[in-house]
Image (spheres, rainbow, N blue to C red):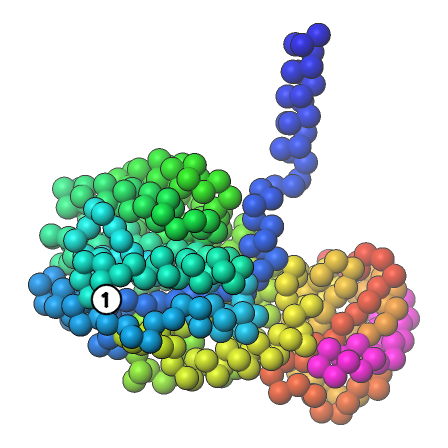
Amino acid sequence: MRNRLSIVLLFLLMMLKGSGQELPRKMDWWKDARFGMFIHWGVYSGPGRGEWIMYQEHIPYEEYRKLAGSFQPRAYDPAKWVALAKEAGMKYVVLTTRHHDGYCLYDSKVSDFTSVKVGPGKDLVAEFATACHKAGMRMGFYYSLTDWHLPGVLPQGYPKSRDILQPLVKQAHDQVKELLTNYGKVDILWFDGMAPGDTGVWHSDALIRMARQLQPDIVINDRAGTAGDFVTPENVVTAHNQPWESCYTMNRTWGYAPSDNNYKPVAELIRLLTSCVSQGGNFLLNVSPDGDGKIPDRQITSLREIGNWIKKHGVAIYKAGPSPIVASNLGFQCRVGDKVYLFIQRWPGIVLPFAWCGSHVISAKILTTGQTVRVEQKEDRVWLKGLPATPPDPYMNVVELTFDGEPKATNPAYR
Ligand code: GLC
């Protein structure tokens, strides 16, 4: 009897596994979130020439350590960063707890190069974690596997020799353990800095196993030599058939660089966000606080503008994924439940036509103004009529389509 019961249970488990629900539930919040904040911040933020200066300017460790001594972020108030992320409509924040320079923004017992031992004299990650937890903001830790402050690594960037790598591997396992033990719930682990082809050397499987043991619900990226839970195209939007997140700079530099004024306009940032969303991906947008801990005004202004846009259009962002009905002559589109949203880049004027629509459109509304527009439908051709002649939103206009059931196309989408 007991045997039979376990066979039935096993069968049920196998059914569940193969039921097409390919993604673990712990990915649900991450996929719904769609928009997050990346924060590149560390000793390099003081000089303000980007996060790679130690390597690019070949700064020896002793000199870089002196720089770290002058890292005194008096304006550091992570609650402000988190509040800004919220204002921008972002649902998670990922902080560089340790970049390639090896400087830990936290109290690592296995390194002499930490914010407790050199510079501010305190655990900056602890304050960040408190701010996130208090605000109910999902928290991610970026962690670089490479470490230029250790002997022999700097000249090589990403070390190739196994002898040089060994201490880094041991340190990474110890430090990831610290990060995932000492700061409460961590939602995302965002690895970086592994040379391609180093998989075996880092004992990545064991590293990931430990991470999941310490934080069972953690979501892990793909840059530690294993597939991870999601992939991370960088400064490019590329759809994948597994969860993906495009990370982007606002100008062209991750770390603070006041002379880099190549800022993307707000319209472009919103276009990138909606492009990710319409293809089923997340958008992780970077900010670069200065050495004092202050996010540049230009970045704050852009984020607030995005936040204002999201207040009116958020229904088309969160939980959104690809739409079966497309209107690629106009821009992008996405689907949330039984609704389809058209992200319009080329405003069509007073009549908006689209086609290959296999479901009945009950109503249509412009989200920017709340104005409903007339719908005419003849088989799979649809016309929305009575739109304003010029686009009401300066950044991205969105039309909400309501159907009497599941939205379907009459033809496979040709995007
Ligand atoms: C790269 C760079 C790094 C940056 C990261 C963000 O790997 O080395 O500076 O932190 O990408 O994705």
The residue shown at (22%, 62%) is 121
Can residue 415 be found in the magenta stretch?
no
Q: Quadrant of residue 287?
A: bottom left
Question: Which of the pair 112/151 is nearer the observer?
Answer: 112
Coordinates of residue 264 in the picture (x, y in percent): 46, 81
Quadrant of the image occupied by residue 378: bottom right
The residue that mark 1 highlights is: 120
On screen, residue 107 above or below 273: above
Q: Which residues are magenta?
A: 365-384
The reply to whether residue 215 is visible in this rendering is: yes
Q: Position of residue 316 (x, y in %)?
A: 68, 68
Q: Residue at x 43, y 59 (%)?
A: 130
Q: Quadrant of ligand 1?
A: bottom left
- Across and down, in percent, residue 365 comes to 79, 77
Number of dots carrying numbers: 1
Q: Judge by depth and name the residue closer to the eye, 5 or 242.
A: 5
| Residue that sits furthest to the top in the current view | 1
- The amino acid at mark 1 is Pro
